Image (cartoon, rainbow, N blue to C red):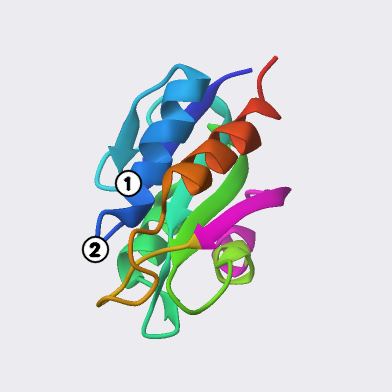
Amino acid sequence: MTYAVRYYTKTGNTKKLAEAIAKELGVEALSISEPVSEAVDFLFLGNSYYAFNIDPEVRAFVASLDKAKVGKIVNFGSAAMLNSTYKKVKAEADKVGIPMDEKKFHCKGEFKGLRKGRPNEEDIRAAVQFAKQYKN
């Protein structure tokens, strides 16, 4: 199996998760500003809610993906108040014909003092366990 990890973050919370997942999978976590140029079986895409939606940059990134290069998108992220962005990302992925894996990872994230210290070490361990499911 081949993997890529991309993330979008404004606070650094999702980057922490991305780095832990990427380390487990033996790849580098990169910002969505870096295109997916190599063919991968799984693209782990980290993101969060901003103003009750995924950021326009995340939508643009998904729209830019080449379905010939990405087997499936695996959604992960954190948010202080809302849950997983899976449905929002899936709506964008459907537009370009890239399937979403049914499994997803989400944990609470700190925002303006709410959920202080999240994602914490337990959240990071859970993200690593999540990524292990995808290893050969």
**Image point 52% across, 78% down: which residue?**
82
Give percent across and percent down for residue 32.
31, 47
Q: Nearer the viewer, residue 131 or 80?
A: 80
2 and 1 marks in contact (CB < 8 Å)? no
Q: Which mark is residue 10?
A: 2
Q: CA distance from mark 2 to mark 1?
A: 9 Å
Q: Which mark is residue 135?
A: none
- Residue 93, compared with residue 81, is above or below; it is above
Give percent across and percent down for residue 60.
36, 62
User: Label 1: how many residues lie within 10 Å, few (<14), some (14-19) or many (20+)?
Assistant: many
**Image point 26% across, 54% down: which residue?**
12
Q: Is residue 101 magenta?
A: yes
Q: Does residue 67 show up? A: no
Q: Quadrant of residue 19?
A: top left
Residue type at the position of mark 2: Lys
Left or right: 16 in relation to 102: left
* Bounds of the magenta segment: 91-107
**Image point 27% across, 75% down: which residue?**
113
Give percent across and percent down for residue 97.
64, 53
Q: Which mark is residue 15?
A: 1
Residue type at the position of mark 1: Lys
Left or right: 87 in relation to 57: right
**Image point 57% across, 57% down: which residue?**
106
User: In the current view of this chain or complex, which residue is farthest to the bottom?
Assistant: 51
Q: Secondary structure at mark 1?
A: helix
Q: Does residue 117 show up? A: yes
Q: Quadrant of residue 5?
A: top left
The quarter of the rendered structure image containing the N terminus is top right
User: Label 2: how many residues lie within 10 Å, few (<14), some (14-19) or many (20+)?
Assistant: few
